[in-house]
């Protein structure tokens, strides 16, 4: 999962983020935006971690589905 490089932004290196829960996905996005090539790996067949099991999100109780 790598974000598009901005014009003139040099790739710094490669990193691996283990776990594609909400924190892992945010970390992967932040690292990709910082110029790293990101490998996001997840043990389970779906991403999202515990977030994918919730039907409401805090603090607004919006639908999480």
Image (tube, helix red, strand yellow):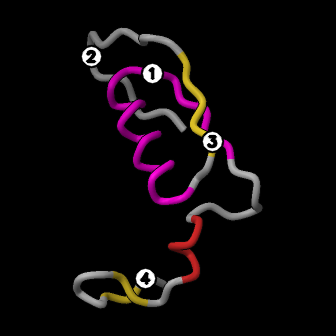
Separation (CA) of disc 3 from disc 1: 15 Å
Q: Residues within 10 Å of mark 4 (few under 14, many from 20)?
A: few
Q: Which mark is residue 7?
A: 2
Q: Residues within 10 Å of mark 3 (few under 14, many from 20)?
A: some
- Label 2 or label 1, whichever comes before in sequence order: 2
- Label 2 or label 4, whichever comes before in sequence order: 2
The front one of 54 and 1 is: 54
Q: Are marks 3 and 2 in contact (CB under 8 Å)?
A: no
Badge 1 is on which residue?
A: 36
Q: Are marks 2 and 4 in contact (CB under 8 Å)?
A: no
Q: Which residue sits at x=67%, y=43%?
A: 41
When the figure is inspected, residue 51 is found, relative to residue 6, above or below; the finding is: below
Dividing the picture into quarters, in which one does residue 18 lie? Answer: top right
- Label 3 or label 2, whichever comes before in sequence order: 2
Q: Position of residue 13 (x, y in %)?
A: 50, 12
Separation (CA) of disc 2 from disc 1: 15 Å
Q: Which residue sits at x=27%, y=16%?
A: 7
């Amino acid at each position: 999962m790598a974000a598009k490089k901005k014009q003139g932004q040099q790739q710094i290196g490669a990193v691996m983020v283990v776990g594609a829960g909400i924190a892992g996905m945010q970390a992967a996005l932040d690292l990709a935006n910082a110029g790293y090539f990101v490998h996001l790996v997840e043990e389970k067949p779906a991403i999202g971690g515990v977030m994918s099991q919730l039907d409401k999100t805090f603090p607004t109780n919006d639908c999480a589905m």
